[in-house]
Amino acid sequence: MRDHRIGMIVPSSNLTMETELPRMLRDREQVLPEDRFTFHSSRMRMKHVTPEELARMNAQTERASLELADARPDVVASACLVAIMAQGPGYHCHAEGQIAGVLQGEGLDIPVISSAGALLRALDAMGAKRIAMVTPYMKPLTRLVAEYIEDAGVEVCDALSLEVSDNLAVARLDPADLREHWRRVDVGDADVLVLSACVQMPSLAAVQPVEDAAGLPVLSAATATVFTILTELGLEPRVPGAGRLLSGEVRMAPAPRPTPEPTSDEGPASTPLPEPYPAAAQ
């Protein structure tokens, strides 16, 4: 039996990644008990999705990464999907590189992933060419997410914006409601339904029921993150009751280590977000 230490960098207002990821991996322990998982988080202050707060949060990358390095994790996952996607197409590669640079400076050559990059990798592993998705965001921010995904070569054929602007309110959304929300999305041309394109909107309890009802694969930012974590650890990506992505049938190769990049005390240049800003949704 082996323990795997999972390091997570989460925004200070995120409540969901530290609940859904442990639930999935504990469910995995029930069927594959030879692997156990522990979770170790560092938080970066962010309450509102504005260019200024995103820049201030990103400027905390070195501090958060150093804190996790002290715990000697086996993998680090950065869980702030929209804060990365708002910086423009492909930005997850830069964000992962910043974390890798800090960790390598502390003598850690370990996998680094982001929820944004994990979502793209999971869609690629499933062979998705067209997706439909549900987000909690205001419509302008949903369009930013769609553009990021489409830049990676996946068409977003329809999207539903629930337009919940407060980040803590997003965390309080009932995942059972997604069993009806998805019916407001046109999935007729979709290969995959992304039930929650947000690491803050709870969805785990709805993934399998919606997949069964919709008749097509269903995933979320959280299930994609777990799929990528398990892949990078060299473990079978299997979690019972979490959709086809985590059935053990879908596989992908581990990615090359991110190219280490220096951090900046000032943070990266921010791409202006469309008005109105959601007041903290990720």
Image: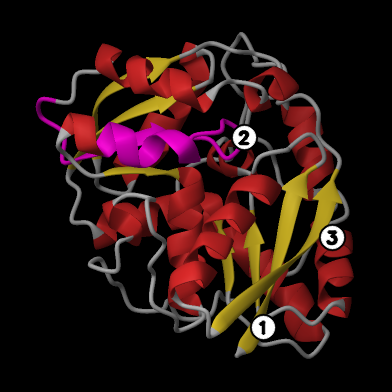
The residue that mark 1 highlights is 3
Between the residue at mark 1 and the residue at mark 2, the CA separation in whole angstroms equals 26 Å
Q: Quadrant of residue 227?
A: bottom left
Secondary structure under tag 1 reads strand
The residue that mark 3 highlights is 64
Q: Which residues are magenta?
A: 188-211
Category of crowding for the residue at label 3, using alpha-carbon neighbours closer than 10 angstroms: few (below 14), some (14–19), many (at least 20) = many
Q: Viewer-nearest of labels 2 and 3?
A: 2
The residue that mark 2 highlights is 200
Residue at image x 57%, y 36%? 82
Category of crowding for the residue at label 2, using alpha-carbon neighbours closer than 10 angstroms: few (below 14), some (14–19), many (at least 20) = many
| Residue 206 part of the magenta segment | yes
Whether residue 34 sits left or right of residue 73 in the image: it is left
Per the rendering, the mark at residue 104 is none
Q: Earlier in the sequence, mark 2 or mark 3?
A: 3
Residue type indicated by callout 2: Gln
